[in-house]
Image (tube, rainbow, N blue to C red):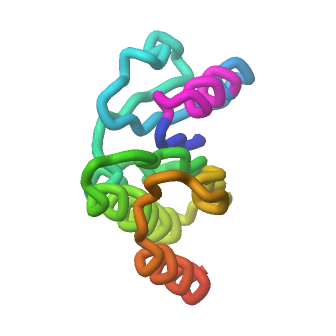
Amino acid sequence: MILVTGAAGFVGYHLVNALAGQQKRVRCLVRNEPAKINICDKHIEVIQGDIRDKKVIDSAVKGARQVVHLAAVIQSPDPEVVCQVNVEGTRNLVESSRQYGVEQFVFFSTLNTVLPVKNRIRIEFYYLTAICYLRQRG
């Protein structure tokens, strides 16, 4: 089974439909937009929850062989929310994936992390912390 976070987003929506079309079992983690996903498809399971909630992540990851991590906050008036979702949420997902023996982990990002963006939220400290953490923990 494949877990897709951010499954209601543009890339996630198309990925989930493509996987289900190949008869793959897909579990979708969505924050608040499950109506965008074809929940009538017998290959698709939807879990609604927040990536910052460790219990939600544990239940979503348990039983998955692959994880495709697409969930992210790109813009928010609160920089702390960006850090919580993009760094802590990803950390939760990585930890649960290791705990439950996920075989493959695919992490998507955005050009906003490497290209200059006007009014960019400055959270370099958090990114460096996450990079060091991931290098140490794999």
* Point 59% across, 60% down: residue: 113
Q: Which residue lies furthest to the top in this view?
A: 40
Residue at the spot x=47%, y=39% of the render?
A: 6
- When the figure is inspected, residue 22 is found, relative to residue 91, above or below; the finding is above
Q: Measured along the vertical axis of the image, is residue 102 above or below residue 49?
A: below
Q: Position of residue 71 (x, y in %)?
A: 47, 46
| In the displayed structure image, the side of residue 43 where residue 24 appears, left or right | right
The secondary structure making up most of the magenta span is helix
Quarter of the image with the C terminus in it:
bottom right
Q: Residue furthest right?
A: 22
**Residue 19: within the magenta?**
no
Q: In this view, does 121 lie to the left or right of 78?
A: right
> Which of the 4 image quarters holds residue 89?
bottom left
Range shown magenta: 7-18
Image coords of residue 121 (percent x, y): 41, 61
Q: Is residue 64 left or right of residue 60?
A: right
